[in-house]
Image (tube, rainbow, N blue to C red):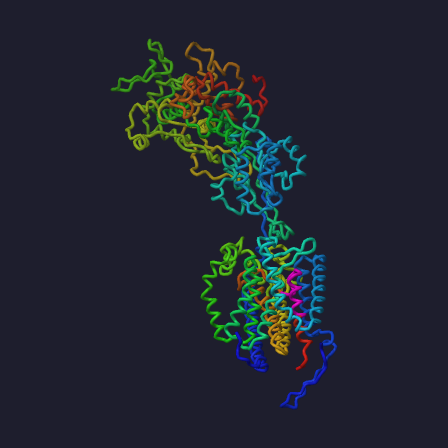
Amino acid sequence: MPEPLALKDHSGESRVFFERAVIGFGVLIVLTLILVARLFYLQIIEHEAYATLSDKNRIQVEPLPPVRGLIYDRNGELIADNVPTLNLTITRELVSDLEVTLDRIDALIGLTVEERESFHRRLKRRHRPHEPVPVRFKLSPEEQARIAVNEYAMPGVQIEARLVRHYPKGEMMAHALGSVRRINETDARSLDPVSYSGTNHIGKIGVERQYEAALHGTVGHKRVETNARGRVMTELERIEPVAGRNLILHVDSLLQRAAIEALGDRRGSIVAIDPASGGILALVSQPSYDPNLFVTGIAYDTYSLLRDSPDTPLFNRALQGQYEPGSTVKPIIGLAGLVTGMVKAESTISDPGWFRLPNEARLYRDWNWTASGMGGHGEVHFQKAIYRSCNVYFYGLAVKLGIDRIDEYLGLFGFGQDTVLDLPEARDGLLPSPVWKREYRGQPWYPGDTVNIGIGQGDMLVTPMQLATMASVIANRGKWIMPRMLKTPDELLPPPSRPMADVDLVPDHVWDEVIGGMEKVVHRGNQVFGENGTAWAYIGQDINYRMAGKSGTAQVVGIKQGEEYHEEELDERQRKHAWFIAFAPVDDPQIALAVLVENGGGGSSVAAPVARAVIDFYLENQYQVAGVRP
Amino acid sequence: MSRDFVRRLPDSNFVFERTAGIGDKLHVDVITVVLLLLISAYGLLILYSAVGQDQNALMSQVIKLGVATTVMFVMAQIPPFVYMRLAPWLYLMGVGLLVATYFFGYEANGSKRWLRVPGLFGFQPSEIMKLVIPMILAWYFHERHLPPKNKHVFWALVMMLVPATLIFLQPDLGTAIMICASGALVLLLAGLSWNLIFGAAGAVVLAAPAFWFVLRPHQKDRIMTLFDPERDPLGTGWNIIQSKTAIGSGGLSGKGLFQGTQSHLDFLPESHTDFIIAVLAEEMGMVGVVTLLILYILLMGRGTIIAIQGQDTFGRLLAGSITFTFFVYVFVNIGMVSGILPVVGVPLPLVSFGGTSILTLFAGFGILMSIHTHRRIML
């Protein structure tokens, strides 16, 4: 493609080039100014914002978790402390192949599929690859040794020591003390994220839950400079955490042990209170469980075993078990009768063994009623009604009092409400009333209901804690000191939501009659048949201090769990519950208690000896009472 | 080749006198060399901080600079006409190597950029093309009337796009863009008509959506990240968020040399290579960056003067392209690190750690000095 020959215009080309080069350099200057403008924007105008960002980048605040407060019993014995446990952790950053490492650990100490899964879940929750994530909590010494020997071959695998709650008394104190659990996602939503930032556990039950705020302490922190991978380079500032408050409880672990031993392998509950201080000396619910199992997370099958056991070891019978009080309420009904003048202490009734409401065919039987008509207690006065536990006397008295007055007097002693200051799980029980019955049952209140409540039967429900409290109020002759676990520091004690007023409308001679009757339950003996105190034969013959008591038996309406699936046990589980309430010494009460033996049978024969053993132990240790049978 | 003579223009009394100084005899442009050494020294200081005061890394860079300077002086001795004659052969060889790379190159970080001479060394043919493209286009237009005719522009574009496409396929978007930029600069300097320039610019804008479909996912990500770094703050957005933080937190006068927290605590990625300007901005503030920019502008001013003083089309176009391409590096790098351009892998000239780019740059300045010191007419 030959073109017309043309001479190259050299000066023209150089002129054009000059023009273009100058324009090019001009553009270059403009673009440089754009860069400068950008720098000005970032470095001058937005400097503060980016300086803050840069600091946020490098400065991390790491929480320093406080040490949880210790809990002592009244004798100064540790019942909740913190022990270092060794956890096996993996630092993601240092591990090249996670599965290989996990397989290796598996070969050494055996990992369950569950453990692997929860490890991966934990791994996902922590974003920084340099943070050690636990694989196995609480290494046994053998596991620790196996890991330690092989640690060199597993980079990133470490044994880490952490302080973890420990209950030296194990299952003995489980229900008295409550326990801490791992913080789960539901807890985390309601917790202050700052103060719990370094904490894995929270008080979930009982004292641990009630005094969580004090026990937890104040979180500290350190400000550290970290690199982009989060590794700490230098520490800039450190504020030490403040350990949680130590608590001293009224509970006496020696008494607690004695009470558990007295109960033996029977199911039941014992609550003992120091009437003078309201301090709960023992709070037993058997069977129990080892709270240490829950601290670091319990294996699912162990948990389901506990949860599904027909003996319900996780269930706190002392606070949440609601039972018919049976005859244990008779002293209160009697007291109401005397105070209101419905009965006089000396006047008697004749007990044929049964009671009948006017215009009703139904017979309300006494406990010693026989079809042959030979039952009954004969002539019964006030104290005999108590020490013989005469039903017919209280049937009649209940009818005379009427349900409103009965409820009023029972209410004065704390029934139908939770009077424990610092045990959040304590239940109210049930004090039935016509209003309640209409509302919840849709039925009117029948006169027969009043008759039943006279001997603590029917719909009324109480907890062992409530009966122990009642015993304590009687021991104090009406002076109310609400039960509590915490001894010191007492400023932590929560104020009562509804303070109980002292029962002060009761004249002294009425207290004498009521307490005298209860004393005779234990001490009146060596009489003709049918004249001894109900418990004398079992506990009163060799006693060397004065005890006031009252037995009771509660009909078993039904047990929540177990029945249907264990038919061979039906018989045993349908037996009556045995109650015994007591306080001693009568003239200077040191201890008031309630004993419940589930399906135990008779209150005097089964529960009273337990009560005696507990009181014996306590008084012996308090006063070194001589000659008390061990 | 250089020969002293005096030329008198026929219609004037003005005398152009050849006054060859010692620099010309050694084929060294003192101003260029001084500026290059100043920038390199400044760059070494920043690099020393960026590598965490690692003297081995510093020495390695010093050695590379030494080698590159030697190459520059050698290149400066070769007269421009040699480059002009070699240009087509260098071009064919370069394209051949790129094709070879396409088939036999070895992969690193997901792209095939390297060709290995068995048992000896590896090199990136694309790097050679950075100098060969302006050379071949300058050669092409040297023979043609300027301003270029449309068909010449067309063939020039073909010559430019063949290697650019091969490089784009490696994939190495950054180098492909730089190759195109150096070629486009030759066209612009050759006097491409403004209509075509604005037309082409308009076409690029219109074709941008189509271009979008050619891009690989990670390249799309980078462009999306430019508009909204927070859309993936720990992934593609991380680099840019951290570099902006480094620059912004530096303020006017910086946190002090070696005191940058963003770089030394490893928040800033690539802190000694592509993102090194952020280290400078963090530690020496806006003052430090503007100082570097002034040095760059002085160097490019000198380059522009050399280009303008060039005696033939080849020399002018080549010198101009080398100079302005250098600026494109600066602008794209700082623009990317400061978040006004998408992230493409372009090092900061003379400052970023790495031998290849420094070698190419110094070789370019060697050619520039050759063009300047082999003139027959001194203005």
Which of the 4 image quarters holds residue A16?
Answer: bottom right
Whether the magenta-drawn stretch holds residue B364 is answered as yes
**Left or right of residue B165: residue A562:** left
Placement of A358 over or under B46, stated as above or below: above
Is A46 situated above or below A376? below
Place of residue B58 in the rendered image (x, y in percent of width and height, measured from the top left): 70, 60
Above or below, comparing residue B15 to residue A197 in the picture: below
Residue B297 in the image: x percent, y percent? 62, 72
Q: Is residue A539 left or right of residue A60?
A: left
Q: Which quadrant is home to the C terminus of chain A?
A: top right
* Quadrant of the image occupied by residue A158: top right
Q: Give x and y (percent) for residue A618.
A: 55, 24
Q: Toward the viewer: B55 or A519?
A: B55
Question: Magenta span covers which residues?
Answer: B349-366
Seen from this angle, which residue lies furthest right?
B22
Q: Nearer the viewer, residue B88 or A398?
A: B88
> Residue reaching furthest front?
A2
| Quarter of the view holding residue A616 | top right
Q: Is residue A552 magenta?
A: no
